[in-house]
């Protein structure tokens, strides 16, 4: 069955007053990203910011849950709503992230990033002491990492550890309680790890040389 993807764009008139407030908070160099619903607004914001001689936009792109940016800019500006994408970007890049949705401005700063890092370290320690490990594999197009999951499973088993693959189209975190698993390794959308103290993203296992 073919799948049809349709962009749902928010129709917003740029809030010039809020944009001026945003400009006063921005550093000289930044990277601008947007969630697809805010594409038109992001293009308008970019156009307005480019008029300023004090601001240099290093990059401009759409952001997904699994996006990872490589930039020398110290700040990322996200045009969108919610903190899901922003927190993922902050954690993967170590950069401060400003969020602008046309009506409000918020920020994920160094303190919040460090707080999340401490949580990640706790999960990593739990992983090291775990006896039974579950590995998430998403069946969704663009998120499926079966080969990676199988590789991790084999490497864990070589170390004498029990590992089990779980394949699903939609991963319901409430269902995790039905399995006697100590820690879950996530090979799907990295945002899943933000919702549970028992889920660790696969890229964090590089510390363990898995």
Image: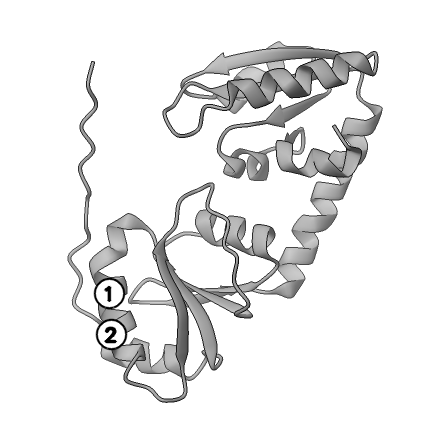
Percent x, y of residue 40 = 20, 60
Q: Nearer the viewer, residue 136 or 2?
A: 2
The residue sitting at 47% across, 82% down in the picture is: 28
Number of residues whose C-alpha sits closer than 10 Å to that of mark 2, classed few (under 14), some (14–19) or many (20 or more)? few
Which part of the image, by quadrant, shows the C terminus?
top right
**Looking at the picture, does residue 183 appear above or below residue 37?**
above
Quadrant of the snapshot with the N terminus: top left
Question: Circle 2 — which element?
Answer: helix
Task: Measure the C-alpha gap from mark 2 to mark 1.
Answer: 6 Å
Residue extending farthest to the bottom is 53
> What label does residue 125 carry, if any?
none
Q: In the image, what residue occupies the spot 54% across and 16% down? A: 175
Q: Is residue 44 left or right of residue 112?
A: left
Mark 2 touching mark 1, by CB under 8 A? yes
Q: Which of the labelled discs sits on residue 47, or is there none?
A: 2
Question: Mark 1: few, some, or many residues within 10 Å (few <14, many ≥20)?
Answer: some
**Residue 172: x %, y % from top left:** 48, 21
Residue 165 point in image, percent of width and height:
59, 12
Which of the 4 image quarters holds residue 134? top right
Percent from the top left, x then y, of residue 119? Answer: 71, 44
Question: Mark 1 falls on what kind of element?
Answer: helix
Task: From the image, tell me which residue sits under label 1.
Answer: 43
Seen at 20% across and 33% down, the residue is: 5
Q: Is residue 8 above or below residue 164?
A: below
């Amino acid at each position: 069955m073919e799948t049809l993807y349709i962009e749902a764009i928010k129709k917003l008139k740029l809030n010039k007053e809020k944009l001026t407030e945003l400009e006063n908070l921005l550093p000289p160099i930044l990277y601008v990203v947007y969630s697809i619903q805010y594409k038109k607004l992001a293009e308008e914001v970019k156009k307005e910011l480019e008029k300023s001689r004090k601001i240099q936009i290093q990059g401009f792109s759409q952001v997904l849950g699994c996006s990872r940016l490589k930039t020398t800019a110290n700040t990322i500006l996200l045009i969108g709503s919610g903190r899901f994408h922003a927190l993922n970007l902050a954690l993967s890049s170590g950069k401060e992230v400003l969020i602008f949705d046309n009506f409000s401005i918020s920020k994920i700063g160094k303190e919040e990033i460090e707080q999340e890092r401490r949580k990640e370290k706790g999960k990593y320690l739990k992983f090291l002491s775990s006896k039974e490990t579950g590995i998430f594999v998403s069946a969704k197009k663009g998120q499926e990492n079966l080969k990676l999951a199988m590789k991790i499973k084999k490497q864990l088993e070589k170390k004498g550890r029990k590992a089990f693959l779980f394949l699903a189209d939609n991963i319901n975190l409430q269902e995790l309680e039905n399995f006697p698993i100590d820690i879950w390794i996530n090979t799907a959308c990295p945002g899943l790890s933000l919702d549970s103290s028992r889920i660790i993203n696969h890229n964090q296992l590089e510390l363990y040389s898995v």
